[in-house]
Image (spheres, coloured by chain):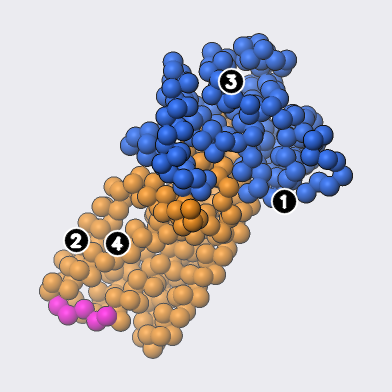
Amino acid sequence: MTRGAATVAILRARLHKEARVLILGIGACALLAYLQRYDGVPLQIAGSLVFGSLSGISASLIARGSGRFGEIDLCELSAPLYGRELARATALVPCILASAALSAYWTVAAIYAHVPAGALVLSIAIVNAATLVALRAGLASGWHKALWVAAACAVAGGGYALSKAPIAVAIGACVLVGFLALRQYGEALARYDPLDGLYRRRGRELL
Amino acid sequence: MRGCRSWNSMPLLEMRSVTYVHHGRTLTGPVTLALEERGRLAYACGDAFAACALSLIAAAIVKPSTGTVFIGAFDTRVQPVHSKRIAGYVQHEAGAHDFTSFTRYIEYRAALWGLPRAESIVRARALLTKLDGVHEQFAYPLVGALIAMPQLLVLDRPQAAYALSILEAAGGCAIFSTHADERDAERFAAACGVPA
């Protein structure tokens, strides 16, 4: 059996648990696209980035360390998986959620006007980069967490500013940021102590 | 890997001066212990958090703040993945609430451990029949841990009432259990017929 089976299993388990968040993100983005149906492409890109990034960042924040996936988290951590395998599989979930929300946005937008393929691809690249940066926030606490969320928002904002640059440059920058963020997440996950989060949430007596 | 001792004389689980420190406070340990293959050990930790922390350290899920843990030939700090192939972990108040059915849960566990799906389901059902009378909230995770046929089973604060069922299901697997206090550890050990 290939180790890809572990990735698929993690994806299935987490997406099943996140079904409501997925539907909410898709619904919100579809509604926004309907409200923006007569706007120009730059405004549509901005709208899709705001809502897509919000979906991705929210999904990233609850992905690990929030206690929402307590049993699944512990099961994954007790499995003989390397940190990078676990990081990749876990990172895919918020990326899928954010991409699904964006796809809903552009599908509704395409009903009313022509959607440039470049705008679609660029928005997906920017939102995924922001989502990957936000993943690190889930493993941090206090002002570190706020800093990583701010960094994710800055990536989304910076990505929008890059939308005026040649598309290859903008997408290349997003891929680079996403790659570095994923590496950083993998390293943080290798150092991650589930007891720390448990202690902060529940305290010694309540355990 | 430890090369100084032969495999036959090597404990399956060995802790040397293990502590868990959180923000400068020592919450667990220092703990020094050794558990041989097919051995049983019920360890009293003092409180629930210490028991939880020690069980996670014994299953290579958490790294100790100080000291060293060996599972088989592997140092859990250096080779956690190899250590996790040997140890199976069952948490306190465990459950499989995130899965729609027992089969889905076993499929998930089998995929994480790289086990054949169909074979794992058959083995899991056979194990579940041995745990007749054990609440599914404990039975499911126990079966989930045992389908990978670990050499070491780590239990976080198991109930003494389930001791015999656990022994039957675990077979020849070594069992290390952590308990919040001496009384719980003695009750569990007595039910297993081993010293605490």
Kindly report the secondary structure that dominates the magenta region of the rendered protein: loop
Q: Disc 3 sits on a residue from what chain? A: B
Q: Which residue is mark 2?
A: A31
Mark 2 to mark 4 CA distance (whole Å) = 14 Å
Disc 1 marks a residue whose amino acid type is: Val
Question: From the viewer's perspective, is the residue at label 2 or at label 3 nearer?
Answer: 3
- Label 1 residue SS: loop
Mark 4 to mark 1 CA distance (whole Å) = 39 Å
Q: Is residue A106 above or below residue B164?
A: below
Residue A153: x and y in percent read 43, 66
Q: Which residue is mark 3?
A: B167
Mark 3 to mark 1 CA distance (whole Å) = 31 Å
The answer to whether dots 2 and 3 both sit on one chain is: no
Q: Where are the magenta residues, as a range?
A: A113-117
- Label 3 residue SS: helix
Q: Is residue A23 above or below residue A106?
A: above
